[in-house]
Image (spheres, grey):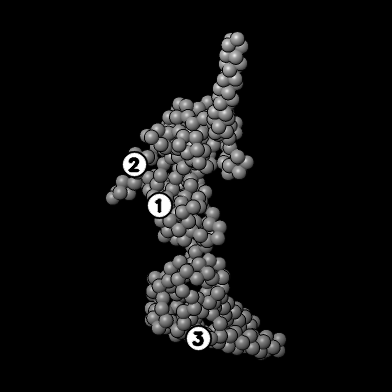
Amino acid sequence: MKSPFYMVMLAACSLWLTACDTRKEQPEESKAFMLSDTMMSRIKLDTVKTEPVRNELTLVGKVVPDENRIIKVYPLVGGNIEEVNVELGDNVKKGQKLATIRSGEVADFERQMIQAQSDLLIAQKNLSSTEDLFESKLVPEKDVITARQMVDKSKAELSRVKEIFSIYGLGKSTNYIVKSPIDGFIIDKNVNRGMQLRSDNSESLFTVGQITDVWVMANVNESDIPRVKLGMPADVRTISFSDEVFKGKVDKIYNVLDPDTKAMKIRIQLQNAGFKLKPEMHATVSLNFEEGSEMQSIPAESIIFDKSKNWVMVYHGRSNIETRPVEVYRSLANRAYISNGLKPGETVISRNQLLVYDALND
């Protein structure tokens, strides 16, 4: 009689225990990790690639204007500086007035112009009279020839004076106007109002330079000279624009060493859109070159350093993300080369991967 009762009780207990186990498993399943749609939109996935291993050489340099686009403006006459119209750093146009010099030399040139015009007028009138007399047989032919020679001489003198006026840019005033020879920026200024200039002054008044293209002059240590090649791509960074990389290339290698620093100079040519790069700015130059071997490569920002190891988040699916240790052979500004831990074609998380790492490993 008791046996069926015990069997019923045993079955009821078994069902209750099974229900308890089911309730315990449900919370475990609810804890399974899966990337949400929001998180998927915030991360970035990159594929592991086999690429040539590149190295990076970091140099220190400074920005200088292109020497081929610089013109020094010298005073062609002596005198007193009456007016200075520009300041250092000003953007000027070709033909724009830079300064005014009141000069006795200009006054003398004006006198020479008046004298040459007067001499030519007299010579032409004398030739006309001589030709009339020669037609009347009152003077010999040699007088006509002499008169013509005087006209030619007067014309030559007037042309000489006019050429001086053209070269110096002189007008009818006794002042000499210093004008900009090109469009550009005033990158050097050695003149002030009231300054007295000697006619034999050898120092330039202004230096006008175009900085749409600039150079970066960088020093290469003696041990790094074999790594530098003509035409190498160069990344240039400055303190003023720390988040911006200016792209250029090595366009000249100066094959001599500075006797004091034992460094060799190289020149990097850059386009200067928006005139962001200013002459004398300090610059950091990064030169990339291939070493000749190949290795697995991923974005450098994919690497997570924790617990004295390097890790990457390998993506297999939204609910299947692996935290994997890797050995980093070299890490550059943009790429990291992995010697062990990854295979070509695998997918890694390269943005906001730290959030996924913390969620999986906390």
Which amino acid, by three-letter code, is at mark 2? Glu
Q: Which residue is mark 2?
A: 222
Q: Which residue is mark 3?
A: 174
SS state under label 2: helix
Q: Earlier in the sequence, mark 1 or mark 3?
A: 1
Nearer the observer, 163 or 149: 163
SS state under label 1: strand
| Disc marking residue 254 | none
In 3D space, how far apart are the residues under numbered discs 1 and 3 (Cα atoms)?
A: 47 Å
Nearer the observer, 190 or 138: 190
- Horizontal relation, residue 154 to residue 59: left or right: right
Which amino acid, by three-letter code, is at mark 3? Thr
Q: Quadrant of residue 204?
A: bottom left
| Mark 1–mark 3 CB contact (< 8 Å) | no
The residue carrying pointer 1 sits among few (fewer than 14), some (14 to 19) or many (20 or more) residues within 10 Å by Cα, namely many
In 3D space, how far apart are the residues under numbered discs 1 and 2 (Cα atoms)?
A: 16 Å
> Can the viewer see residue 111?
yes
- Which residue sits furthest right? 135
Q: Which residue is mark 1?
A: 61
The location of residue 354, given as percent across then percent down, is: 48, 40
Residue at screen point 56% across, 57% down: 273
Residue at screen point 39% across, 75% down: 200
Q: Is residue 235 above or below residue 345?
A: below
Q: Quadrant of residue 116?
A: bottom right
Kindly report which numbered mark, 3 or 2, lies closer to the viewer in this rendering.
2
